[in-house]
Amino acid sequence: MNDEIKHFPENVQKLLADARIPIKQLKPIYYELTIGEQFPDDSIRLIEVNNSLIEELEKSKKLVIRGANDDFAALCTSDQIFEIKSAETSNTLLLASPLDSSSVNKENGCIALTVNSILHAKLELTQCVPRLKRISQLFEENPYRGHFDDDNDIENPKPKITMENIKSEVQASDQAIDAYLKKLNVVTIDGYLRLLDFDFRTKLIEYIFSLLSIQDWSKDHIPIDRCATEMKEICPKYVAKQFLEQIGTISNDGNSISLNANTISTHYALDLLRNLEKMKLSEFMTCWRECVPSDFPIDLDQLKGFVIISEGTISYIDTDNLSEKPYERMKTLFSRKNTWTLSEIEPFLSSLTTSNAEFNSLLAMHTRCIIKDGQKYYVPKYN
Amino acid sequence: MVQILIEQAENSTELILIELQGALDYAAEKQSLSGERVGFLFFTQNAICVIGQHVLDGKMVELDKPLLVMRKRQADGTNNTSYQVECVIKRKLLFHKRSKSIVHYSSKKM
């Protein structure tokens, strides 16, 4: 027998010969797999991730799975969300761990590997869209209306909502949650999160405008602290401050804000439309121009995703309350308007999809494309 | 209504992932398999795995997407359920072909 292979113990040599493995080509180190003491270790899971998740894990040292009991499991990072699904495989996955290096038997080159888990499935992640609808539902019950707040009604206590509640109930990344809370105009009051009631916001905005003319402040340069102090008649200063920061862009020194023209114009438009079934478009444009101060531009483009314009009328649609199920949402949209252009329907569907390809397949699944006068329109696929 | 944390374990361990085609069968009468030998791994340019009477040819392949090995920690009185990431696996030993059987002829020589 060849001298080179002398280092393999006899039983291994016999095995190699039986298996007709060409010994000469073998590297001198070999491994022996043994079932470990903890076998079967059922607490081990394999999860397939992408490199950005590994970076996130290394940076923040944690990832988080969120959802209510009847939800699917969703893995959330600071800016993304993934649905977790288990994928079975007919193959066998062994997880082997090398014992410490002292286990290398120098003499015969054997390294012991211990197998503690044998798996037939791994978890896979698919990027999905944040499910934010629950947030607005949580707040609807008890919006904040300023000084006459009845939150301290002892006989009929209202649910208190904290950031922690939201994070454990809402399947979305922290960034998506923060952005959405800002969009809804949620503020912190006595340590709890509260939604500012729509009509109360109208009151606040009106008040800010009256202050602008009294104090002769520019809408692009409102001193946050002084303005909030002046607003104490209708709400505590710290609430006014949070609201100002939400409807404007804070200056570099942090002392003043510039009112966000889009936010203001949109608010007035919704104020006109939200309690009406629909309004004649021409009539609406006149009214809208009348309520918004003249130095704020108005443009129908600002209302994308808030209104449906059809046959010369305009009506309000609450995107936040649309179903998160694509079929249901399509049904609602088409019941409001029968033919849509791409740019009209896009704002109502974008929150259901994570990519352009997904958006196109959603359209292809639920709509039919027709061409009328050289313009593409989308109509429902089935009636 | 839960948040389950996935945290980096304090001490990461080194683990090797071995993927075999098919399933492993073993004599069912054994109470515990601890200490039983599964088989041997040999390396040439590629890898050879010998399990029982089977010889498998395979190789080390890089994974398209890395795998995290997580250990589930059940909720107890003070802690919620959580996962600890013990290891990040970026490649695996893949034995994806059908196995060859060992034919015993050595006994004839005796």
Image (cartoon, coloured by chain):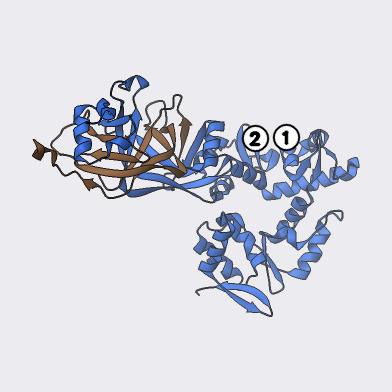
Chain colours: A blue, B brown
Q: Where is residue A21 in the image (x, y as percent from the top left)?
A: 26, 40
Q: Do dots 2 and 1 share one subunit?
A: yes
Q: Could you tell me the amino acid type at mark 2? A: Ile
A5 to the left or right of A340: left
* B80, A29: nearer the viewer: A29
Q: Earlier along the polypeptide chain: callout 2 or callout 1?
A: 2
Query: Which quadrant is the C terminus of chain B positioned in?
Result: top left
A339 to the left or right of A242: left
Q: Could you tell me the amino acid type at mark 1? A: Pro
Residue at mark 1: A236
Whether the residues at callouts 2 and 1 have beta carbons within 8 Å, the answer is: yes
Q: Position of residue B82 (x, y in %)?
A: 42, 33
Disc 2 from disc 1: Cα separation:
9 Å
Q: In which quarter of the image is residue A116?
A: top left
Query: Would you place residue A93 above or below residue A287 in this image?
Result: above
Q: Is mark 2 on a helix, strand or loop?
A: strand
**Residue at the image position 16 percent from the left and 32 percent from the top:** B31
Q: Which chain contains the residue that carries disc 1? A: A
Q: Which residue lies furthest to the top in this view?
A: A102
**Disc marking residue A189:** 2
B61 to the left or right of A216: left
**Residue at the image position 57 percent from the left and 39 percent from the top:** A78
Q: What element carries label 1?
A: loop
* A241, B47: nearer the viewer: B47
Q: Which residue lies furthest to the right in this view?
A: A216
Judge the density around disc 2: few (<14), some (14-19), many (≥20) Cα neighbours within 10 Å: some
Q: Position of residue A167 (x, y in %)?
A: 53, 39
**Residue at the image position 74 percent from the left and 38 percent from the top:** A240
* A298, A240: nearer the viewer: A298
Judge the density around disc 1: few (<14), some (14-19), many (≥20) Cα neighbours within 10 Å: some
Q: Which chain contains the residue that carries disc 2? A: A
